[in-house]
Amino acid sequence: MIILKIEADLHTHTIASGHAYSTVEELAKSASQRGLKLFAVTDHGIALPGGPHLYHFTNMGVLPEKIHGVRVLKGVEANILGNGNIDMGRRLLHKLDFVAAGLHSNTGHNFKNMKEYTDAIINVMKNPFVNMITHPVNRYFPTNLERVVLAAKKYGIILELNAGSYCRRKNSSRGVKEMSIKLAQLAQKHHVYLSLNSDAHYHDLIGDVSALDFVLNETQIDEEIIINSSAERILSFLDYQKEEKKSAV
Ligand SMILES: [Zn+2]
Ligand SMILES: [Zn+2]
């Protein structure tokens, strides 16, 4: 039985998302108690019903760099829209520390088949400010995982294995074990970074990725490709990307 200790959680939500129940302060306190070194605050982009106003993101600079001794990355989980773009412009994206993007219901997309979903995700990866695709495993938003992994390699994007997908409410849509295993195997094969995140909508869940233990037990993935097993690895990855992107605003 392999138990992975992650140092960082790159996907968490606060009350600003409208359907999550903790504050940044509460997340930071729990992160500290769990021994995390870093977490990203990634509230939903504005296209999701109940999501925050853009001002939430423009003002994130007021948050300290560390809270309760834990490094806090100011981020977003942007929505992938029907036109294959995301719901946040580059001038704002470049001010954030961490940009995740994912497909969600009720955000205006109406893709018809696997090719359209895959093309939309790949198009979003071309945005130089996007760092990670959230929950690419989804029964209702099917993608060609090999194309997604190869594009992630090409554009330097982290792919997420999402622990929250295995809670009872989401099990039927995102909690597809065989697809999570396939994603991990493809990432290993093509040397693409994975991130195992909680997608916590309540502070007590931050850093808990135990729902993904089955992936580690049923695959042979190296710890080095799990980018959030080391906070330092994430920070140097983001620094490298920032250098690459300076001219893209
Ligand atoms: Zn999401
Ligand atoms: Zn989320």
Image (tube, rainbow, N blue to C red):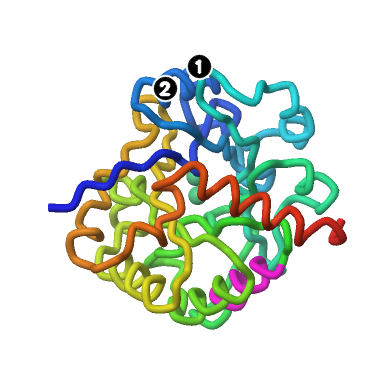
Amino acid, disc 2? Ser
- According to the picture, the residue beneath numbered tag 1 turns out to be 68
Check the image and report above or below for 248 versus 44: below
Q: Mark 1: which secondary structure?
A: loop
Q: Main secondary structure of the magenta part?
A: helix
State left or right for residue 215 relative to residue 106: left
State left or right for residue 81 relative to residue 143: right
Instruction: Name the residue rendered at 49%, 42% in the picture.
Output: 231
Q: Which residue is at the far left?
A: 1
The x and y percentages for residue 60 are 72, 29
Instruction: Name the residue rendered at 73%, 35% in the picture.
Output: 57
Q: Residues within 10 Å of mark 1 (few under 14, many from 20)?
A: some
The x and y percentages for residue 180 are 32, 65
Q: Residues within 10 Å of mark 2 (few under 14, many from 20)?
A: many
Instruction: Name the residue rendered at 69%, 57% in the picture.
Output: 241
Asked if the magenta segment contains residue 225, the reply would be no
Residue 110, disc? none
Give the residues drawn in magenta, as a range: 117-126
The x and y percentages for residue 37 are 46, 32
- According to the picture, the residue beneath numbered tag 2 turns out to be 32
Q: Mark 2: which secondary structure?
A: helix
Amino acid, disc 1? His
Q: In this rendered view, identify the residue nearer to me: 10 or 87.
A: 10
What distance separates the C-alpha of mark 1 from that of mark 2? 6 Å
Q: Quadrant of residue 210?
A: top left
Circles 1 and 2: CB atoms closer than 8 Å: yes
Q: Is mark 2 within 8 Å of ligand 2?
A: no
